[in-house]
Image (cartoon, rainbow, N blue to C red):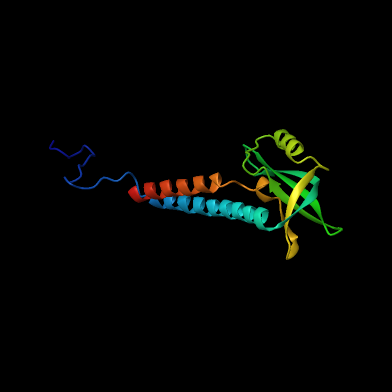
Amino acid sequence: MGAGYGSGYTQAPQGAARTSGGNNAWLFYLAAFAMIILGYGQLKDSLHARKAQSSWTATSGVVSGHEVRRVGSKSPRTYNTYITYAYEIGGSWNSAGPIEVNRNTFYISEDSARGDLADDFPEGGSITVYYDPYNPSDSSLGTGAAPGLAAPIIFFLLAGIAAVIGREQ
């Protein structure tokens, strides 16, 4: 029996390119795009909080409620923390929320989320609120409740890495 007959195996011509089952570059580009979107959202929130804290009017407020929300229905479950608050401007009270707080903390237990809320933002506790003097119903807790700049930087770096890997695919 000659080579290649009956063996079920044929050899690729010399110099032919071998593929590993397809081009997955689009997956990496999709991941990069998603990370850019997430990073942009985090950056936008952080810059809005910094602007509010530096150029809006500060007043005292009070935490009026807590809420813990489960994220996703499958395991592992994670939780986000929210507060509602009220603040006074010239004798009249405004309320806001729910607004997400402790955004850079990853909670896998509802009890730990509730514990951090009670420690960081106790109901009835006072907080500093920043409001837009031209639109007093627009308020913010400043950088205390916003994501820092580390999160968007990490997302943008991961997007760059994913794009480079996708290009090499």
Name which residue lies at 56% across and 47% down.
Answer: 149
Between 30 and 62, the one nearer to me in the picture: 62
The one nearer the camera, 33 or 138, is 138
For the residue pair 33 and 4, the one nearer the viewer reads as 33
Residue, far right: 91
x and y, in percent, of residue 104 in the image: 62, 42
Which residue sits furthest left?
Answer: 2
Rendered residue at 32%/44% (across/down): 20
Query: Quarter of the image holding residue 91?
Result: bottom right
Does residue 94 appear to the left or right of 29 in the view shown? right
| 35 over 116 or under it: above or below | below
Residue 40's x, y, as percent? 54, 54
Residue 54 appearing in the image: yes
Count of numbered circles on the image: 0
Quadrant of image for the N terminus: top left
Outermost residue on the bottom side: it is 134
Position of 85 with respect to 73 (left or right) is right
Q: Which residue is located at x 69 percent, y 48 percent?
A: 100
For image coordinates 84% across by 59% down, the residue present is 90
> Is 85 positioned to the left or the right of 28 in the image?
right
Residue 83 image point, x, y percent = 75, 47
Query: Where residue 74 sits: x, y (%)?
Result: 63, 41
Residue 169 shows in the view: no
Give whichever of 90, 2 is nearer the camera: 90
Q: Is residue 146 above or below residue 116?
A: below
